[in-house]
Amino acid sequence: MLSLFRWLVRLTIGLMIGFVGAAVLAWYFAVRSLPDYDAQLALPGIEQRVEIVRTTENVPHILATTDHDAFFALGFAHAQDRLFQMVVLRRAAQGRLAEMFGERAYAADDLSRRLGLWRNAEASLEAQDEPTRAALQAYADGVNAWVEQVNKGALGRGAPEFFLLPGDIAYWQPADSLAILKLVAAGASGQVAAEVTRARVSLAVPERAGDLTGGVGEPPLPPYASLFGGGARFVTPAEEAAPDWFASLVGYVGVGRGATANAFAAAPERTAAGAPLLANDPHVALTTPSLWYLARMDLQAGSVIGGTIPGIPAILTGRNPGLAWGLTPAWVDDQDIVMEEVQPGAPDRYLADGGWRDFATRQEVIRVLDAEDRRITLRESDAGPVIPPAHLGLAEVTPAGYVPSLRWTGLSEQDTTMTALIALMQSTDRGQAQRAVAGIVAPAVEVTLADAKGVAQVLAGTIPRRPADHPTGGRMPAPGRDARARWLEPLPSDAPLRVTSPLQGIVAATGAETAVGAGTALIPPPAQPTVPAAGVAVVPIAAGVPSQEPQAGPAGSAAGSDAATPEIAPPVPESLGHDRDDPLRLSRLSRLLALREIHSRDSFIDAQLDTVSPAARALLPLVGANLWFTGEPAAPGTPERQRQDALALLAEWDGNMGEHLPEPLIYSAWMRRLQERLTHDELGGLATQLAGRLRPAFIERVFRNTDGAAAWCDVVQSAPVEDCATIARQALDAALIDLSARFGPDVESWRWGDAHVARHDHPALGRMPILNWVVSLVQPTSGDGSSIARAPVLGAEENPWAAVGGAGYRGVYDLADPDSSVFVIATGQSGHPLSRHYDDLSERWRRGEYVTMSLDPTLARAGARGITVLSPAE
């Protein structure tokens, strides 16, 4: 017995020693992949000596003599810090994720291959001008130089993720950068998702679809089923729908999600220092590391600093000595789904406007880790690539006997967007920048510009135009056989409506609400604003930029002193986009900018970090109009008393979605339940899917009974006829029951930040047990989907209020004192989980703090974290 005990003790000790040894060995190899920022390297490809000076925040300042060396060093720095991220982005664009991640990535690869992101990028390489091709090659050489250093020095494969996931690190090619840019373009447009939603709502409630999906001033949508004949059947394919790979795997960039951003600028006459200010904050999925990366580089045209995306050799938002610029996705309709009728018995033929035609076909092989290779057949019509209905939610809206094709500006094989972006960052003034961005193809963007003389905005990118008699106006899928569904010649690059000149010195745009004349605000200085009396009439949400925000409660406490400040929106000369459901964020930004006659860097920062929800301020007076301070006195602890306490809090609330407040949680839960109750009996499961996105314009139409929209309040299946006040009360009660179960019965103890947590998940390792605690970042955050500091929620039942997006980058550029410009990203510069710079900027980002942006090399060296010297190899 004693002998057995001794052997058990020895075995236990041996296992413990083995476990500790394995942990130490894993730690050793993981740490070896941390780059040494204090190094001197002789590398082939370098023309002259280059210094990469790392600040205390690990921002690389590339001090180079030639443009070639600057791009080389940027590629080297990107690879040092974000090699795994770059490989994942490249594989996503190539359709080769399944080789690394296995079966769960197959759908992503299938969609990427059908979109032809890599093929079109490779074809577009020859369309770039010579300086851009040289920059792409120099950048690729820099990436490869770091890969060679990893191989030569056995530096842990360059990133610890490569120990856990199979796959070789192929050398970087110039086309890889173009492919990642194509991937970003695919993620910037959400028009396919919008078309699918409209079509699904039209199929469910054809007579009232416009209430939920209609836009301002748009003609009514035709019943979707009527486009394909009265007998059209919509059959969901038997195959399993493609998983949501944006949220579950790739993370950094997803196809079909759409993107937003804020950008605003003030001309010299509207600033305290007499020189322009510009702010920009692109919104992306929250991941670790962030999609964005801070960098500064010396070029012959002048030093440039700002935000980059690893894999792309350009400063996409930032400044140089004479120019500042920022990008916001332009919500133009640059995608159409075309339903092609397949010839019975001949699946490779479809009906076009001139008769039956053959699809262009080709076959490709997708390799899947630990599974058999899969051969897929790619088909293409005149409209574009055929997308299987299992992708992008198309299954529910594809008629039997049809297949969907995608018409998209990003399918160009002559895409000069990279040339335009590299030329933009080297421009010295607005005129030169405007000429540079004329080469942007996809995605379409609003480019906000500022130089010493003023500010402006330019709508850049290929902008489709459609016939006046287009079957759906591009708002829903259309039959391919109908010649009217084709596009006309795109909007000319020199069209006057592409340029927005400032009115009274300020311009602003807010991404998803941006379109010509609709999402670009021209804001005059305030002229003795006055505060309206409580209950003043307000312009409807759906009517564009309202002249006043409604009060949140009966006393008007939420209106604030800015409630009557006017904004001026230009007329809409041409409809170029749809689905601008929520102009309230732009309205809020316009108001904040109009409140000050003179702006400073700090006032721009305040505006960028504003967490007031204009949707809350607009909806609560309508939804709660018959509920404020009503009902008999109720005893503490009863549901009636809890409802009264909640309404009392909301009545005094100013709409600030602060993480430490209970009101944002009550409001958000109430509106979520309300929207679901209004739509569930008509839309069924679709209502649950739409719950993740609040549609303020829809709720406003219902509670104003616009064109009879109050009919949504009646539950069709019930015998009584419910009114909107009853539905509002029931929704509030349901929300309070849910919140009480999650956070306890005390309303005042609830906190928005307890539910509204920003999950910065590692796209590859974030769902692995134990590892997710190491690689992912969770922190409470303020704001919501309509606040300027945007933080949209997930809508999933386990935590409907988890924040899934936000400003991955924030920058404020002051041309009066360039060294006072600031920027920050959401996580940290390094993608290595063991690096001190993996998440060191995240707390600053959450608190609304910034890092100083300076072009002075002396300042960079003074606080250097390390200096890497690259010299030509002998």
Image: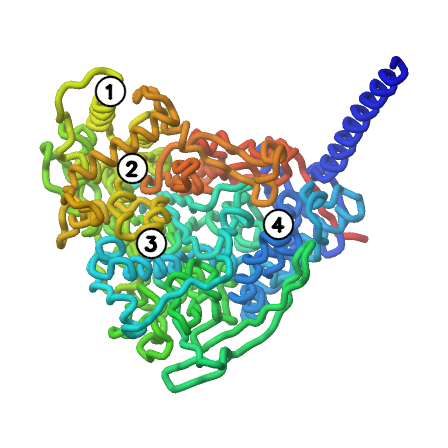
- Above or below, 516 against 685 in this view is below
Left or right of 816: which side holds 310?
A: right
Closer mark to the observer between disc 1 and disc 3: 1
Dot 1, how many residues are within 10 Å of its Cα: few (below 14), some (14-19), or many (20+)?
A: few
Nearer the observer, 619 or 35: 619
Quarter holding residue 792: top left
Left or right of 769: which side holds 202?
A: left
Location of mark 1 (residue): 638
Location of mark 2 (residue): 613
Question: Label for residue 456?
Answer: 3
Q: CA distance from mark 1 to mark 2?
A: 30 Å
Closer mark to the observer between disc 2 and disc 4: 2
Residue type beneath disc 2: Ser
Q: CA distance from mark 3 to mark 2?
A: 27 Å
Quarter holding residue 599: top left
Question: Which numbered disc flags the more N-terminal residue, 4 or 3?
Answer: 4
Closer mark to the observer between disc 1 and disc 2: 1
Residue 245, position as x, y percentages in the image: 52, 51
